Every structure is written in structure tokens, then in C-alpha cells.
Amino acid sequence: MSEITRGDATVPSAEGAKVIAHVCNDIGGWGRGFVLALSRRRPEPEAAYRAWHRDRAHDDFGLGAAQLVRVEPSVRVADMVGRRGIGKGSKGVPVRYEAIDTALARLADEAVRLGASVHMPRIGCGLAGGKWTHVEPLIAGRLAARGIAVTVYDHGEGGA
């Protein structure tokens, strides 16, 4: 399915085209978890995410959406909207597995088109509060089943 390794998902260890994937929220917040590590290395994803959210009345921003931002000639970052809000509320944790599944399907189409491998933390399992036992099968079904090489990085920052 996917390879799990120790390391930093912001610096993918692979040859060729690569996509760094992460889960973000549906309210435009960017400031905790994996995105902090991402922003320390590359400013483009945060700026693109904020613009995407700001213009949401005119674009596809919302749960299940995904956008790819080019940060190097062979590296893109996939912002996948898979969290409702940012905190635990009356409806439980922010993770929305159906939205992650939809965003992964969109990511898969782009990864195939680009001939890219996908690199990520344990998406949806950090601040979003999800369970890896629910997320891993989504990755297997949407990415690995299409022959996309996936590397999941365990790091001190956790998944977004």
C-alpha cells in the first residue's frame, strides 16, 4: 500500500515528480500543525491556500476540494480540505473522512497526470483528530490502487 518512514514530509525523499499532500480546514485557518513546518520551507502553499479561501465564492473551495501548488519544478503541494473547522465541538473532532476521500480522488487524478509520487504526514490524524485506521484505507483505495507510490512520514510535527 504505502511506505511508512521516519522523516520530514516537507522534504520528500524520492526521484522525479513529487506531491506533498496535507489536510487543511474549511475556514481558512493556517497556523498550527504540519502547515507550520511546510511554511518554514516554502511560502507559496500558505499564500495560495489563503487566496483560495478568500475567493471561495468564485471557486471550488470547500470540504473535499484539493488544489496543487507548484513550489519547485518537480514538487507540488496538495492542499486537501478535509477538516470542518479547527476545534472539537458538539459534532466531535474536525476530521471529515468523506471529504478526505474525495480530495484524495482528486489528488490521484493529478498525481497520475504528473507521474508523481505522493508524500505526506499521517493526514487527518493530528489536529484534525482522525484515526489512522480510518485514513489509511482511503489512501490505499484512492492512491495505491492506482499504482501511485505513497510515502507517509512520521515526524515530531504529526499529521495536519
Image (cartoon, rainbow, N blue to C red):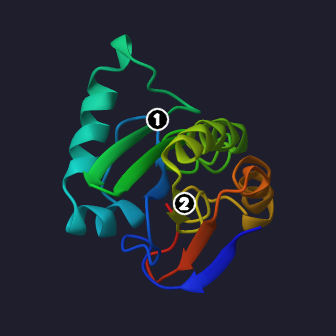
Residue 111 at what x, y percent from top left? 55, 47
Q: Quadrant of residue 71?
A: bottom left
Position above or below: 4 against 54: below
Position above or below: 50 against 16: above
Q: Nearer the observer, disc 2 or disc 1?
A: 2
Which residue is drawn at the image coordinates 45% and 78% (left, top)?
Answer: 13
Residue furthest bottom in the image: 6
Residue 33 visible in the current orientation? no
Label 1: element kind: loop
Seen from the viewer's position, the closer of residues 134 and 147 is 147
The residue that disc 1 covers is: 26
Q: Is residue 85 left or right of residue 2?
A: left
Q: Quadrant of the N terminus?
A: bottom right
Which residue is drawn at the image coordinates 48% and 46% (left, top)?
Answer: 114
Name the N-terminal-most of marks 2 and 1. 1
Which residue is drawn at the image coordinates 53% and 51% (left, top)?
Answer: 115
Within 10 angstroms of label 1, few (less than 14), some, or many (20 or more) residues? Answer: many
Residue 6 at what x, y percent from top left? 54, 87
What amino acid is at disc 2? Val
The residue that disc 2 covers is: 118
What amino acid is at disc 1? Asp
On residue 82, the disc is: none
Label 2: element kind: strand
Seen from the viewer's position, the closer of residues 111 and 81 is 111
